[in-house]
Image (spheres, rainbow, N blue to C red):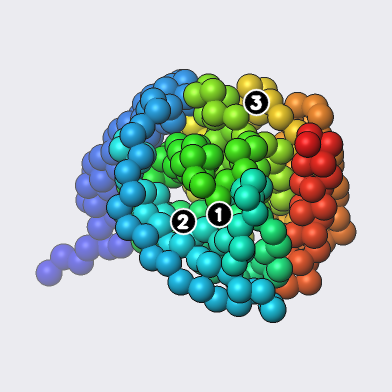
Amino acid sequence: MSSIHKGDRDLKNRPLLKVVMKSLKFWVCCFITIATAIGLSYWLKNPMDELNKGIPVIKLVQETVYEEKDGEALRTYHDLVLDIGPYGLAKFTVSLPEKIPEGGLPTALVVNGLDTGRKCLKLIQEHGNAALIAFEYPSMLHKMKSIAAVFYFRSARRSALAVPGQLVSIARWAQEQSWHDKSPVSTIGFSLGAEFLPAALHLACSEKVCLGPAVLAYGGAGLFSIFYAIPGHFLLKCLRAIGGAILFHPLEPEKHLPHIQGEFLLINGIYDQLIPLSAAKKMQELFPEPKTIINLETEHVKPNDPELLGKLIRIARDWLEEKREKGG
């Protein structure tokens, strides 16, 4: 019997290995080519072509009214769902004082992180003599928290691109309500909300919707660096940063900030690990005047940090009241 040495087996298997490697290289090249083509198709589009779907007809779908105490004061809450046509269904909660002045109330639209709506309002102590609207993100965006997000990226992208249109439509709806004092609706964005607001402010300008002073806290410009800053393995961070920057390119604050007008308060934390200081400074530089910039010695704002949240709310409220007094 003749024996087959290990070297002989390697020689016999080498042609098969070459075929496998060539096939693998071919499919990798195909994947890179297709991904690049899709990425360029997203990247080269005008952001407003994807965000601006015209001025929709707004229809009330659902409303639930109830009362709860805010400290010692009684507040009336309205959980609402509006059909905003091409922007889909918008969910939000309105907080109103028990007694509404004859001239109406100043109104602020609050856009927080993913824990929004009624949960967001619970984080705000003493709602004061104003109407507060807390936005609720489309449910599909909540799936972005899990690893399963890769299977929902197209639906998540569609939902994310609808957010600016929903925010502008809610502001238009609020200006027509009997409890509103007819002044421009102010906007307040924390964390993720601060990433959506530039696109919403740009869309409002293009649709001639007048919005009031805006507060943006713990946001930044440069989606690549923001996605990359999310903790994880190096390769995962790179893929997430590239994919996120391409898919959500229409929301990139850099594309919208040169086209907006108004008065702005920008708040950031110099020790923020989720929004790199370079991204925060880029946003601060790109915002037009007049603007007020405050950099706090804090990390990223979190729902479980009531002390920082309370401080941010006080800063935002004092600044908005100052602007309202000057404007009134």
What is the CA distance from the residue labelled 2 to the residue labelled 1?
7 Å
Residue 179 in percent (x, y) is at: 55, 50
> Residue 302: which quarter of the image?
bottom right
What is the CA distance from the residue labelled 3 to the residue labelled 1?
22 Å
- Is the C-beta separation of discs 2 and 1 under 8 Å? yes
Residue that mark 2 sits on: 92
Q: Earlier in the sequence, mark 2 or mark 1?
A: 2
**Residue at 36% from the left image edge and 32% from the top image edge:** 56
Q: Name which residue type carries label 2.
A: Phe
Q: Quadrant of the C terminus?
A: top right
Q: Is residue 45 visible?
A: yes
Residue 65 in percent (x, y) is at: 43, 67
**Residue at 49% from the left image edge and 31% from the top image edge:** 250
The answer to whether 68 is drawn above or below residue 311 in the figure is below
Q: Is residue 37 left or right of residue 207?
A: left
Marks 3, 2: nearer the viewer = 2
**Residue at 79% from the left image edge and 34% from the top image edge:** 327
Residue that mark 3 sits on: 260
Determine the secondary structure under disc 2: strand
Q: Name which residue type carries label 3.
A: Ile
Most distant residue in the front direction? 102
Residue 185 in percent (x, y) is at: 61, 41
Residue that mark 1 sits on: 133
Q: Is residue 110 visible?
A: no
The answer to whether 186 is drawn above or below residue 192 in the figure is above
What is the CA distance from the residue labelled 3 to the residue labelled 2?
25 Å
Determine the secondary structure under disc 3: loop
Q: How many marks?
A: 3
Q: Earlier in the sequence, mark 3 or mark 2?
A: 2
**Residue at 71% from the left image edge and 68% from the top image edge:** 126
Q: Name which residue type carries label 1.
A: Ile
